[in-house]
Image (cartoon, rainbow, N blue to C red):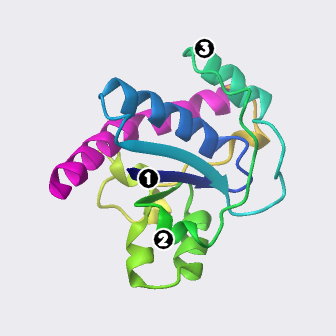
Amino acid sequence: MYRIITVCTGNICRSPMAEFMLTQAITEAGLMDKVAVDSAGISDWEAGRPIDPRAARRLALAGLASQAHRARQFEQLWFQERDLILTLDVDHYDELQRTAPDAAARRKVRMFRSFDPDLAGRDPEEQGIYDPWFGGDADFDACWDMIQQAVPGIVDYVRNALDGQR
């Protein structure tokens, strides 16, 4: 099983949105029996709390149910257990690069939007998705759009990784 985790600050906005959107795309690509997607936050600030209602509403507009989601903090052992660690902003990227146990783990950490063809190859500082928690519905729509732009590239990357495992 190829395992992906999406990571933001508290695991109530960006990373669960990315988790559910990526899961839908993986399913539509026919890869769900080979790929698992989950999410976490770099902090424990929101641990145990449900997804932000604004994020849940935005996901629901696309038919994605998120009521069962509960926030959790990224665990160190996931560096070994996950194949791809996708961070939503540069502070998450920097933190996981700093705390990774070795070079192999650091190579697993990528910016989510590094898979957006318009941002591929750019500095991580330019690939972040700002925190919509401080804004309103329009900010969650913008977050949705930024995530959506990268999803096809991630699906292609995973498909290629799976093909390489054969």
**Residue 53 percent coordinates (x, y):** 79, 27
Residue type marked 3:
Leu
Secondary structure beneath label 3: helix
Q: Taking 24 as reference, is 122 left or right?
A: left
Within 10 Å of disc 1 (Cα), the crowding (few <14, some 14-19, many 20+) is some
Q: Determine the CA span between mark 2 and mark 3.
A: 35 Å
Q: Which mark is nearer the camera, 1 or 3?
A: 1
The verdict on residue 58 being magenta is no
Q: Determine the CA span between mark 2 and mark 1.
A: 10 Å
Residue position marked by numbered label 1 in the rendering: 3
Provide the residue span drawn in magenta.
138-166
Q: Residue at x 69, y 40 (%)?
A: 13
Q: Residue at x 44, y 75 (%)?
A: 105
Q: Is residue 99 above or below residue 119?
A: below
Name the one closer to the observer, 14 or 125. Answer: 14
Q: Is residue 77 above or below residue 21?
A: below
Residue type marked 1:
Arg
Secondary structure beneath label 2: helix
Residue type marked 2:
Gln
Residue position marked by numbered label 2 in the rendering: 80
Within 10 Å of disc 3 (Cα), the crowding (few <14, some 14-19, many 20+) is few
Q: Determine the CA span between mark 1 and mark 3.
A: 26 Å
**Residue 44 percent coordinates (x, y):** 80, 61
Q: Taking 160 as reference, is 36 left or right?
A: right
Secondary structure beneath label 1: strand
